[in-house]
Image (cartoon, grey):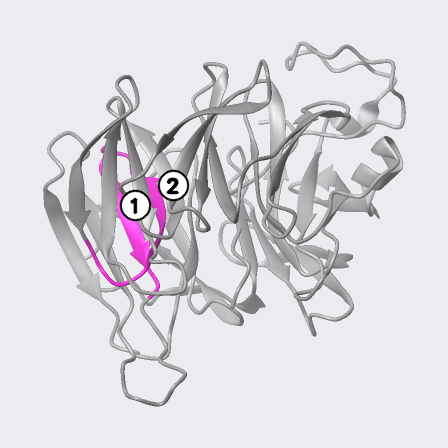
């Protein structure tokens, strides 16, 4: 199945002399490549592969050059098996290693390792509230783990979930998409982070994967549907749901008319006025829709190109499409402007799946 991946981060240094807690608004002129670029997470081969990080120097006008396997270069070791998700907060970059069952904590400027979190079974995604803790969804234990960054250790867990995937924090609550893991689910779990208690579930479509907010502060859930590979006819349509995080009331839902489409990678521009997703997980086009204008399941193709990963430049609105090509050789990163016109492209690592912007 697809090794799932939300959006752009900071990076790179060949030197190990920079501060562990740099001022993100100040860039040392001796490291000009930190000013612009994209950190790209490459999953690695499906079976036993090693995840890597590529750094693409440049900005929304194009790529100047690409440097591959920068984590290995800086830390003298590999990330481990099967990179699944990456995130940047105010202090660190986090890389979720699904196969190795770890989360790597990296310095957001130098990419030096600041710790490896263990104790997971099958970690999927991570969310940070910038309060000294992160939350990691884990299929293997059907839990969301709370991790104390000061000790790089699990300190608590949320259990009322099934195949937890994407997460979003709003109005003091943590919303967790229950994909069902290798089975089926159709709910979003709601938790109070302060009390670490389960407040209930919101019923949505089959296999919810990603949650994203819009300009009005409402939340959208992308549900991938289901392919019944047994041939027994259990295929289910994908859908997208919209709900109010304050009340948990579903405001709208739209079902796809194409049974074979299984979308992924729900993304947003900086204001939430435009949302994007990949039409079908392995080789779909990029779909764009405006939350305040939607009346049916979104089908407007912005970029007609096979996409495995997707990220939106939160400053310029440029769109980064990641193409895994044949899944056996280096993939390709393609940069488009807001209108969907190609700007540049470059080869990166094996199975590129996510990207984060270095300075935003």
Q: State the residue at coordinates (58%, 13%).
A: 150
Can residue 266 be spotted in the picture? yes
The mark found on residue 326 in the picture is none
In this view, the residue in front, 358 or 303, is 358
Q: State the residue at coordinates (75%, 28%).
A: 111
In this view, the residue in front, 314 or 40, is 40
Residue 303 is situated, as x and y percent measured from the top left of the image, at 50, 64
- Tally the marks: 2
Q: Earlier in the sequence, mark 2 or mark 1?
A: 2
* Location of residue 255 with respect to 312 vertically, above or below: below
Can residue 217 be spotted in the picture? no
Residue 8 is situated, as x and y percent measured from the top left of the image, at 58, 38
* Location of residue 173 with respect to 139 vertically, above or below: above
64 lies left or right of 321: right
Quarter placement of the C terminus: top right
Q: Quadrant of residue 46?
A: bottom right
Q: Residues within 10 Å of mark 1 (few under 14, many from 20)?
A: many
Residue 137 is situated, as x and y percent measured from the top left of the image, at 43, 41
Marks 2 and 1, Cα distance to the nearest angstrom? 6 Å
* Location of residue 234 with respect to 31 vertically, above or below: below
Start-end of magenta stretch:
204-224
Provide the residue designation for mark 2. Answer: 143
Q: Would you say the residues marked 2 and 1 are in contact, meaning their CB atoms lie under 8 Å apart?
A: yes
Residue 115 is situated, as x and y percent measured from the top left of the image, at 69, 25
Q: Is residue 220 magenta?
A: yes
Provide the residue designation for mark 1. Answer: 161
The secondary structure type at the circle numbered 2 is: strand
Q: Quadrant of residue 359?
A: top right
């Amino acid at each position: 199945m697809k090794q799932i991946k939300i959006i752009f981060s900071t990076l790179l240094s060949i030197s190990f002399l920079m501060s562990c807690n740099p001022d993100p608004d100040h860039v040392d002129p001796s490291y000009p490549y930190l000013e612009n670029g994209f950190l790209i997470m490459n999953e690695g081969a499906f079976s036993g592969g090693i995840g890597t990080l590529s750094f693409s120097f440049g900005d929304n006008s194009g790529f100047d050059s690409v440097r591959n396997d920068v984590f290995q270069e800086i830390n003298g070791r590999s990330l481990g098996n099967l990179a699944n998700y990456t995130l940047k907060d105010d202090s660190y970059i986090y890389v979720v290693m699904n196969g190795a069952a770890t989360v790597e904590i990296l310095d957001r400027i130098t990419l030096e390792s600041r710790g490896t979190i263990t104790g997971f079974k099958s970690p999927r995604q991570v969310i940070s509230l910038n309060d000294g803790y992160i939350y990691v969804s884990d299929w293997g234990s059907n839990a969301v783990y709370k991790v104390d960054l000061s000790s790089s250790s699990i300190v608590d867990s949320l259990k009322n979930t099934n195949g937890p995937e994407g997460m979003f924090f709003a109005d003091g609550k943590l919303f967790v998409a229950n994909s069902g893991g290798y089975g089926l689910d159709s709910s979003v779990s709601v938790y109070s982070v302060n009390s670490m208690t389960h407040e209930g579930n919101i019923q949505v479509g089959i296999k919810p994967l990603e949650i994203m907010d819009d300009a009005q502060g409402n939340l959208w859930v992308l549900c991938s549907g289901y392919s019944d590979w047994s041939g027994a006819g259990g295929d289910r349509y994908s859908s997208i749901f919209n709900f109010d995080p304050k009340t948990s009331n579903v405001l709208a839902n739209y079902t796809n008319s194409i049974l074979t489409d299984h979308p992924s990678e729900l993304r947003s521009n900086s204001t939430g006025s435009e949302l994007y997703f990949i039409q079908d997980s392995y080789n779909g086009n990029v779909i764009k829709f405006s939350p305040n204008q939607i009346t049916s399941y979104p089908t407007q193709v912005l970029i007609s190109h096979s996409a495995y990963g997707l990220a939106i430049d939160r400053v310029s609105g440029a769109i980064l499409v990641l193409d895994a090509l044949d899944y056996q050789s280096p993939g390709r990163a393609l940069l488009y402007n807001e209108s969907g016109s190609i700007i540049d492209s470059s080869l990166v690592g094996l199975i590129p799946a996510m990207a984060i912007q270095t300075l935003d």
